[in-house]
Image (cartoon, rainbow, N blue to C red):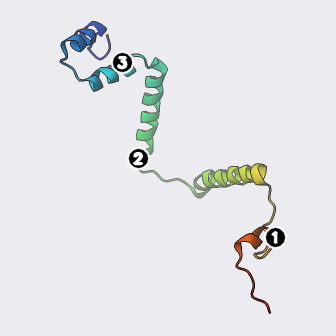
Amino acid sequence: MLFGVSVLDITSDISKGTRSQEKILIVQILSHTPIWVFALFVILFVFGLMQSRTRTVSLIPALQLPAGMIALSLTGIYFSFGFRTMPPPGGAPFRPFLPASSDK
């Protein structure tokens, strides 16, 4: 029994055609969802409520998260592409995209 609806009620409603397919699908999804998912949802909901309150934060903690995100972004760029400088416009990689020169 989940949310006051038993599996027998659902199957009898399917045969009678009294419930819509959407309601049946939602109940089946919720009945097969692990319990830890609901616990995680409650925990995240409580954290969200705690963050909705107005509070005063000093400068250092307020800058730690953006600094960490910048560091992680630069690390990702370094390991993906390296820190090579781009060639100047008109360099070899850009030649196919530049208009042909009309030097005479």
What is the x, y in percent for residue 77? 73, 53
Three-letter amino acid code of the residue under disc 1: Ala
Residue appearing at x 36%, y 18% in the figure:
28
Nearer-N-terminus badge (3/1)? 3
* Secondary structure category for the residue under label 3: helix
User: Is residue 5 placed above or below 97 in the rendered structure?
Assistant: above
Closer mark to the observer between disc 3 and disc 2: 3
Quarter of the image where one finds residue 67:
bottom right
Residue appearing at x 75%, y 50% in the figure:
80
Q: Which residue is mark 3?
A: 28
Numbered label attached to residue 53: 2
Location of the N terminus by quadrant is top left
* Secondary structure category for the residue under label 1: helix
Three-letter amino acid code of the residue under disc 2: Arg
Distance from disc 3 to disc 2, alpha carbons, whole Å, reads 36 Å
- Return the residue found at the far front: 104
Instruction: Tell me, yes or no, whether the two marked residues, 1 and 2, touch with CB atoms within 8 Å.
Output: no
Instruction: Tell me, yes or no, whether the two marked residues, 3 and 1, touch with CB atoms within 8 Å.
Output: no
Numbered label attached to residue 54: none
Q: Nearer the viewer, residue 8 or 33?
A: 8
Q: Nearer the viewer, residue 18 or 47?
A: 18
Q: Nearer the viewer, residue 1 or 81?
A: 81
What is the x, y in percent for residue 89? 75, 75
What is the x, y in percent for residue 32? 42, 16
Location of the C terminus by quadrant is bottom right
Q: Which residue is mark 1?
A: 92
Distance from disc 1 to disc 2, alpha carbons, whole Å, reads 55 Å
